[in-house]
Image (tube, rainbow, N blue to C red):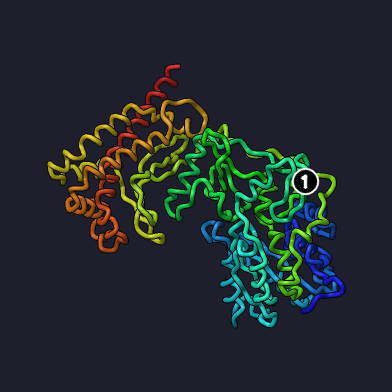
């Protein structure tokens, strides 16, 4: 398709805040209408892109109500049911396909010259499968749908954002644009927003700093939040390790629609202070990383709504290139984005500033604690972890052990009977080797303020011991025992088999992962010894404390 003398007409389905629309508009395409069921997103789209943005459930949108003579259809059906971040990939795929099917129904009705749909990478194989004979999308095979997995970082976005782009456009033409884009890094974005005159890191637009919105910094992370974030990223019990903090000399990880101050998904950077502090990104930093110009305003009622708007959007810096690809423009004829964006201005009125998340002063009394003991953790999810559990109004604490495979996770009962079994089967030499570190740990547990551990963790009361203090002591003891067991490898392997037989009896042959446990016999036996001694003592300490508390209450 050659360059047009008149603007092509497009509609945007499942349009969100208008990420598709802004990019197409800058590529000289007229976006006639957008359709989205979330009202605040439509307000944002309308005020920034100046076109009709209808609040409607597209599943119920009448075909007769859609404009005619449409050259281009774009859109991003909801990805929630397809995303691996939704219940580990356990979303309702059939429900998610209803939106894909509706999108294709509208394409089939309008018969545009070209169309494109954006979604998470997983959708590519689902669409390919369902387009086959007998599939749920078979009726749309004639639309010429091809799926492609791209990383938007290859097209100049300062974010590693892998997505499926499906459609009937010339994908090879889009690929030629890579050579024309400038790679950008997280640090480029952070630094660009700090000057008295802010220069947009992608669009080149300049604004006085006092006109920059949504750039209010959150409180720096406190020591507990730093500890949790570091653990979630560098020592996650299942997923691959991430760097902490996020490096400024790389593109950033995928910007998500939801995250908390203590989540694996949070992007955390070091501050410039000398105290070694860390912070999360501002809304404006997130928006720039997501390819929005600094003039774009988000009309959300609160901080969470704006996070959702930004994280769910199609990056306009990428949709600009898609707009040219949909028109068939050769790479040499694509105007640099910074030139195309010079007409952009901030919409009026500006949205209200929404205060960022604050450090949690109080959490639910049932707040969960579940962290792997650093010295007692292997790859692929094999680990000992300190965790709490809730029984009625009371919280208990224990060390748990998990092994096996991702599809068959197993554990052992780590109680006094196991401690007795291991002790009775140990050689005198091994008994002597573990005695000192184990006594030191048990003395600590005896003195620790176990009764108030949950209150401290949920920030509902004072206490002398914090959960991470217990975790660190367990890890320290684990390291000592691993060293002590290093010269007793064969015996450690025998004791591990004994523990497994004690739990699984005749089913031992069917247990996955046993060879891995034996290859790491010192670590596994150290964890079994620690847990089988600590757990009954933790339970007893809590039982006594509750009994004493009940007695005092009855005497009042």
The residue nearer to you, when weighing 309 against 285, is 285
The residue lying at 13 percent from left, 45 percent from top is 427
Name the residue at the right extreme: 6
Q: Secondary structure at mark 1?
A: strand
Residue 331 seen in the current view: yes
Say if 535 sits above or below 254 in the image: above
Quadrant position of residue 454: top left
The residue lying at 56 percent from left, 52 percent from top is 249
The residue lying at 26 percent from left, 56 percent from top is 519
Quarter of the image with the N terminus in it:
bottom right
Name the residue at the left extreme: 428
The reply, left or right, for residue 374 in relation to residue 92 is left
**Percent of width and height locating residue 27:** 78, 66
- Residue, disc 1: 207
The residue lying at 28 percent from left, 46 percent from top is 528
The residue nearer to you, when weighing 59 against 239, is 239
**Percent of width and height locating residue 532:** 28, 42
The reply, left or right, for residue 135 in relation to residue 109 is left
Say if 531 sits above or below 11 in the image: above
Quadrant position of residue 395: top left
Name the residue at the top extreme: 556
């Amino acid at each position: 398709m050659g360059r047009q003398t008149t603007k092509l007409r497009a509609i945007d389905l499942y349009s969100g805040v208008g990420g598709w629309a802004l990019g197409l508009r800058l590529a000289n395409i007229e976006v006639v209408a957008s359709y989205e069921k979330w009202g605040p997103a439509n307000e944002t789209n309308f005020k920034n892109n100046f076109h009709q943005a209808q609040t409607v459930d597209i599943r119920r949108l009448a075909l007769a109500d859609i404009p005619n003579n449409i050259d281009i259809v774009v859109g991003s059906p909801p990805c929630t049911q397809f995303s691996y971040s939704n219940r580990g990939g356990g979303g309702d795929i059939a429900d998610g396909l209803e939106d894909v099917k509706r999108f294709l129904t509208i394409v089939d009705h309008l018969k545009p010259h070209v169309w494109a749909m954006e979604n998470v990478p997983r959708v590519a194989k689902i669409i390919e499968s369902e387009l086959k004979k007998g599939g749920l999308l078979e009726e749309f095979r004639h639309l010429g749908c091809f799926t492609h997995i791209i990383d938007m970082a290859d097209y100049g976005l300062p974010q590693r954002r892998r997505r499926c782009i499906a459609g009937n456009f010339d994908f090879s033409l889009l690929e030629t644009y890579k050579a024309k884009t400038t790679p950008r890094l997280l640090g480029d974005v952070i630094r660009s927003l700090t000057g008295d005159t802010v220069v947009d890191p992608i669009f080149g637009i300049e604004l006085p700093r006092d006109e920059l919105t949504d750039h209010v910094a959150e409180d720096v992370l406190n020591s507990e939040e730093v500890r949790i974030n570091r653990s979630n990223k560098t020592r996650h019990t299942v997923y691959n390790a991430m760097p902490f903090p996020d490096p400024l000399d790389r593109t950033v990880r995928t910007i998500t629609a939801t995250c908390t101050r203590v989540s694996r998904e949070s992007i955390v950077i070091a501050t410039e202070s000398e105290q070694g502090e860390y912070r999360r990104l501002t809304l404006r930093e997130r928006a720039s990383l997501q390819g929005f110009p600094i003039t774009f305003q988000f009309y959300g009622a609160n901080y969470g709504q704006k996070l959702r708007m930004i994280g769910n959007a199609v990056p306009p810096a990428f949709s600009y290139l898609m707009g040219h690809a949909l028109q068939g423009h050769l790479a040499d004829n694509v105007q640099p984005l910074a030139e195309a964006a010079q007409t952009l201005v901030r919409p009026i009125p500006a949205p209200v500033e929404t205060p960022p998340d604050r450090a949690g002063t109080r959490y639910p009394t049932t707040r969960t604690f579940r962290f792997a003991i650093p010295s007692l953790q292997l790859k692929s999810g094999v680990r000992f972890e300190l965790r709490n559990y809730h029984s009625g109004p009371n919280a208990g604490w224990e060390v748990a052990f998990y092994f096996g495979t991702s599809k068959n996770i197993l554990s052992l009962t780590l109680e006094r009977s196991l401690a007795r079994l291991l002790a009775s089967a140990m050689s005198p030499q091994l008994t002597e080797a573990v005695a000192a570190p184990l006594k030191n740990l048990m003395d600590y547990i005896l003195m620790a303020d176990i009764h108030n551990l949950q209150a401290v963790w949920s920030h509902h009361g004072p206490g002398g011991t914090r959960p991470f203090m217990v975790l660190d002591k367990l890890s320290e003891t684990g390291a000592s025992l691993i060293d002590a067991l290093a010269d007793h490898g064969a015996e450690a392997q025998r004791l591990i088999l004994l523990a497994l037989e004690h739990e699984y009896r005749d089913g031992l042959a069917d247990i996955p992962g046993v060879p891995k446990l034996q290859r790491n016999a010192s670590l596994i036996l150290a964890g079994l010894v620690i847990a089988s001694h600590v757990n009954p003592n933790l339970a007893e300490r809590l039982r006594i404390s509750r009994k004493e508390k009940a007695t005092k209450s009855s005497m009042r």
